[in-house]
Amino acid sequence: MHHIFIDTNIFLDFYRESQHNFSTSKLTEIISKFTSKSDIYKVYITNYLKDEIFRNRATVLKEQHDELSKKLKLIKGFPTVVRSLNTYSQFDLDLKSLEKSYQILKDEFLEKSKSQGFEQDQFLNQFFEIYDTQVIADTNRLAARDRFDFGYPPGKKDSYGDALNWLFLLSEVPPNTNLYLVSRDKDFSNPLDTKEVNPYLAKEWREKNGGEIIFLDSIIKLLHTLDEADNTFEQSYISEELDKLINSSSFSETHIQISKLSQYVNRFTKDQIFKFFEGYFRNPQINWIASDKDISLFLQLIQQNQHYSVDLRKSARGLLPEEEDIDPE
């Protein structure tokens, strides 16, 4: 399981302009990813985190409103020499039309801001429905205040929030666990290299939890990193379970391993397919029950894999010239 903490500023980035295009399709993709992986993506959501997001939402939207005004600011008071041009009258009409559209746009922005009607609002509501909200105990609040007052990171002026979240994670994340910490907050980052986590926090996590911190500054980078980690873990799992299958010592063990591996057959590599056939031909605990429904289906799935070929199967079979000719097809 991957243990994840996403800081307030990352959630608020969905309302901000950024290098990432959080279009409707992208928001849907992110929700689908976390929903489908909810059994292995453990995201820690606290009541304080949700309150902090809501408190700061209006401020972020005000920033975006001001940015909108700057980008769409209309130039007025053109000099006489410009207004004397033949094309000015049409330009003036276009300008007035644009002013009208601009006002409609601003009105809609304000209405959605008040009603929480943005797609980003719907996204956050859906995201928070995936995971339980955990209530931070009063003891953690007091400890966060003491930690901040003594100058330990993370923390910012007049706010115990980062310290509160950090102490919560130290107490709730299982021992010997790597933590994916997603934040753009400089209070979590290394002052010498903002792409790295604060070295004191990294040291504290190792000493008190036993794991490591994977520090990331966007939810997009988080998903890419998790995909890579999942792929590495998945291939390791496939290799381990495949070894157990080809060395199976009983029919029942074969059925168990076939059940474990069936959902991963489409992700077998060429080498893994070759290894399976080599084991299939060598081990009677597999090939003697080839007609059993689950084994037969497994063989069909193998043949649907993009790396499968008749030549590959024959190559594996060719390693055993003295064996009885057993052909899964």
Image (tube, rainbow, N blue to C red):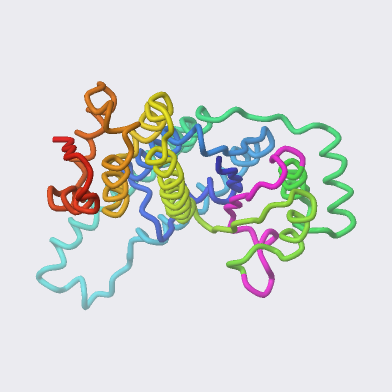
Residue 30 location, x and y as percent?
40, 42
Q: Residue at x 88, y 54 (%)?
A: 149
Please state which of residues 247 and 71 is positioned toward the viewer in this rendering. 247
Q: Quadrant of the C terminus?
A: top left
| Residue that appears at 24% across and 53% down | 319
Residue that sits furthest to the bottom in the current view: 81
Q: Is residue 178 magenta?
A: yes
Residue drawn at (52%, 39%) of the image: 41
Boundaries of the magenta span: 171-193
Task: Choose top left, top right, bottom left or bottom right for residue 93.
Answer: bottom left
Main SS, magenta residues: loop
Q: Is residue 96 visible?
A: yes
Q: Quadrant of residue 89?
A: bottom left
Q: From the viewer's perspective, is residue 115 above or below residue 243?
A: above
Please identify the quadrant where the N terminus is shown: top right
Of the pair 277 and 174, the residue shown nearer to us: 277
Point out residue 84 in the picture as x, y percentages from the top left corner.
Answer: 16, 73
| 280 lies above or below 159 | above
- Identity of the residue furthest to the front in this view: 322
| Residue 118 visible within the image | no
The image shows residue 88, relative to residue 133, as above or below, that is below
Taking the spot 83% from the left edge, 58% from the top edge, the residue there is 152
